[in-house]
């Protein structure tokens, strides 16, 4: 997990931070998939999946050829949930 974190942060961080985003390693599954979450402005970008394919999958495969691929996990942030709850409670 720690080695995968270095690969992900090393390759993707510079690409995503240029667009006010970042990446978080969620899990390396027992069947060889790497699950990540994109945060910041990049989380809502329509090109996020393409970035995963072009940047992350290539970096992960290069460092760990045995990996099966990168899965982009979409999660709603606590901040967004809290904003939605505030709006709903006003009604």
Image (cartoon, rainbow, N blue to C red):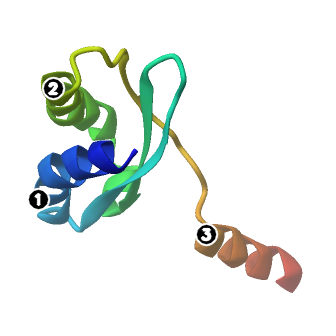
How packed mark 3 is, by other alpha carbons closer than 10 Å (few <14, some 14-19, many 20 or more), is: few
Tag shown at residue 58: 2
Residue 9, placed above or below residue 88: above
Q: Please report whichever mark, 3 or 1, sits nearer to the chain's N-terminal start.
A: 1
At x 36%, y 15%, the residue is: 68
* Coordinates of residue 35 in the picture (x, y in percent): 46, 36
* Coordinates of residue 10 in the picture (x, y in percent): 14, 53
Q: Please report whichever mark, 1 or 2, sits nearer to the chain's N-terminal start.
A: 1
- On the image, which quarter does residue 59 sit in? top left
C-alpha separation, residue under disc 3 versus residue under disc 1: 25 Å
Residue under label 1? 14
How packed mark 2 is, by other alpha carbons closer than 10 Å (few <14, some 14-19, many 20 or more), is: some
Tag shown at residue 80: 3
Residue 68, placed above or below residue 80: above
Labels 3, 1: front one? 1
Taking the image as shown, residue 7 lies to the left or right of residue 32, namely: left
At x 60%, y 75%, the residue is: 79
Labels 3, 2: front one? 2
C-alpha separation, residue under disc 3 versus residue under disc 2: 31 Å
Q: Nearer the viewer, residue 46 or 29?
A: 29
Q: Can residue 91 be seen in this snapshot?
A: no
* Coordinates of residue 17 in the picture (x, y in percent): 18, 64
Total labels drawn: 3
Taking the image as shown, residue 72 lies to the left or right of residue 23, namely: right
How packed mark 1 is, by other alpha carbons closer than 10 Å (few <14, some 14-19, many 20 or more), is: few
Q: Nearer the viewer, residue 42 or 27?
A: 27
At x 32%, y 32%, the residue is: 49
Q: Please report whichever mark, 3 or 2, sits nearer to the chain's N-terminal start.
A: 2
Taking the image as shown, residue 47 lies to the left or right of residue 40, namely: left
């Amino acid at each position: 997990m720690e080695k995968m974190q270095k690969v992900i942060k090393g390759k993707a961080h510079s690409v995503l931070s240029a667009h006010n985003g970042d990446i978080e390693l969620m899990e390396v599954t027992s069947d060889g998939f790497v699950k990540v979450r994109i945060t910041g402005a990049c989380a809502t970008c329509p090109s996020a999946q393409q970035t995963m394919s072009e940047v992350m999958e290539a970096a992960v495969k290069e460092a760990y050829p045995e990996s099966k691929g990168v899965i982009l996990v979409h999660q709603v942030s606590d901040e967004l949930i809290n904003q939605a709850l505030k709006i709903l409670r006003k009604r």
